[in-house]
């Protein structure tokens, strides 16, 4: 089972990919944008995690969003749409 964890729109946005209970990749968005405490959506970090694990978004079983997903549901739906 693959779970993509996302923390965005808050201090130090990040993403992590867990496969069968083991962390296979994790990254903060600021590592890619070169902005300290980057609070933007984690597009680069998500892409990194998927590439590092050698998988695609379609192969992810679940996505978890840290914080309050309802105000940011449009961003999550953009990520999950094909």
Image (cartoon, helix red, strand yellow):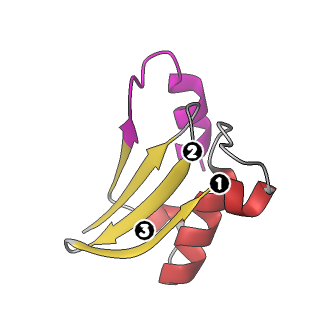
* Residue at 38% across, 37% down: 66
Residue 16, compared with residue 21, is above or below; it is above
The part of the image, by quadrant, that contains residue 38 is top right
- For the residues labelled 2 and 3, the Cα–Cα distance comes to 23 Å
Q: Tell me if residue 14 is in the magenta stretch.
A: no
Percent position of residue 82, x then y? 60, 50
Q: Is residue 67 left or right of residue 50?
A: left
Badge 2 or badge 1: first in the primary sequence: 2
- Residue wearing tag 3: 59
Quarter occupied by the N terminus:
bottom left
75 above or below 16? above
Q: Which of the two discs, 1 and 3, sits closer to the camera?
A: 1
Disc 1 crowd, CA 10 A, few/some/many (<14, 14-19, 20+): many
Residue 5 % position (x, y): 40, 52
For numbered disc 2, what is the local secondary structure? loop
Q: Give the crowd class for mark 3: few <14, some 14-19, many >=20 residues within 10 Å.
A: few
Q: Position of residue 41 (x, y in %)?
A: 65, 40
Is residue 4 visible in the rendered structure shown here? yes
Give above or below for 9 relative to 12: above
Q: Position of residue 21 (x, y in %)?
A: 19, 71
Residue at point 48%, 81% (across, down): 53
Q: Which residue is mark 2?
A: 13
The residue sitting at 59% across, 31% down in the picture is 9
- Residue at image position (80%, 57%) is 34
State which region is magenta.
Answer: 65-82
Q: Nearer the viewer, residue 35 or 22?
A: 35
């Amino acid at each position: 089972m693959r779970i993509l964890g996302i923390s965005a729109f808050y201090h130090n946005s990040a993403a992590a990919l867990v496969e069968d209970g083991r962390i296979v990749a994790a990254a903060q968005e600021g590592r890619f944008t070169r902005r300290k405490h980057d609070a933007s959506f984690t597009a680069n970090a998500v892409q990194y995690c998927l590439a590092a694990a050698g998988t695609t978004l379609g192969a992810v079983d679940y996505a978890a969003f840290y914080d309050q997903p309802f105000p940011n549901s449009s961003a999550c739906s953009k990520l999950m749409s094909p």
